[in-house]
Image: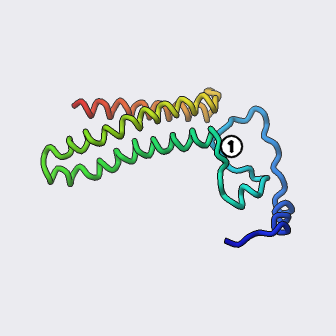
Amino acid sequence: MVEQHDCQRDEYKERDPPLPAPAPHQVRTVGNLLPDRNDRRDLNHGVLAVSWDTIRVFIHVLAASVWVGGQLTLAGLVPGLRDLSADAPRAVARRFNRIAWPAFAVLVATGIWNVIAIDPAFDTAYGRTVMLKVAVAALSGVAAFLHSIS
């Protein structure tokens, strides 16, 4: 990796003037977790500062990856599992449930934590999008539960 000298960092200041401060009424989003554009040290290293916000979002995305990714993986495996035996898909699904339902619980818990931390105004487009996401997650959980008991 090529090191940048102080004169190169000064070049950024001339080329990219500082951004104006956000208005107090602007909605706080996950985008606020990105490095400060005015602090070139963050951009040079590409590393997010570790904070409760980044930990919260990381855990939420990890749980969502397990929940959704596992379901998509199982959907792709079912035809091959049926070729092995009629009971194979059900056995694999039961084993997956040992990972999936705890991940869903973490997903719900961190989702609630996200809404509390961000505190979106629900009469805005962003707030309505958050509520739609909550509805889709709830529908996903209900559908998976009903499918598992059938």
Please give the name of the residue rendered at 45% of the width and 42% of the height, measured from the top-left corner: 64
Please rate how many residues cluster around mark 1, counting C-alpha atoms within 10 Å: few if below 14, some from 14 to 19, many from 20. Answer: few
Left or right of 102 on screen, residue 96? left
119 or 53: which is nearer to us? 53
How are the residues colored? rainbow
Dividing the picture into quadrants, the one containing residue 146 is top left
Examine the rendered structure and indicate whether residue 71 appears above or below residue 39: above
Q: Please state the horizontal and vertical placement of residue 86, each as a whole percent of the image.
A: 13, 45
Dividing the picture into quadrants, the one containing residue 94 is top left
52 or 29: which is nearer to us? 52
Please give the name of the residue rendered at 42% of the width and 30% of the height, measured from the top-left corner: 138
Please give the name of the residue rendered at 78% of the width and 33% of the height, measured from the top-left corner: 24
Quadrant where the N terminus sits is bottom right
Q: Please state the horizontal and vertical placement of residue 107, each as a whole percent of the image.
A: 46, 36
Left or right of 98 on screen, residue 11? right
Q: Please state the horizontal and vertical placement of residue 7, each as a whole percent of the image.
A: 85, 68
Q: Secondary structure at mark 1?
A: helix
Residue named by callout 1: 32
Left or right of 12 on screen, residue 50? left
139 or 5: which is nearer to us? 5
Q: Amino acid at mark 1?
A: Asn
Please give the name of the residue rendered at 29% of the width and 52% of the height, measured from the top-left corner: 76
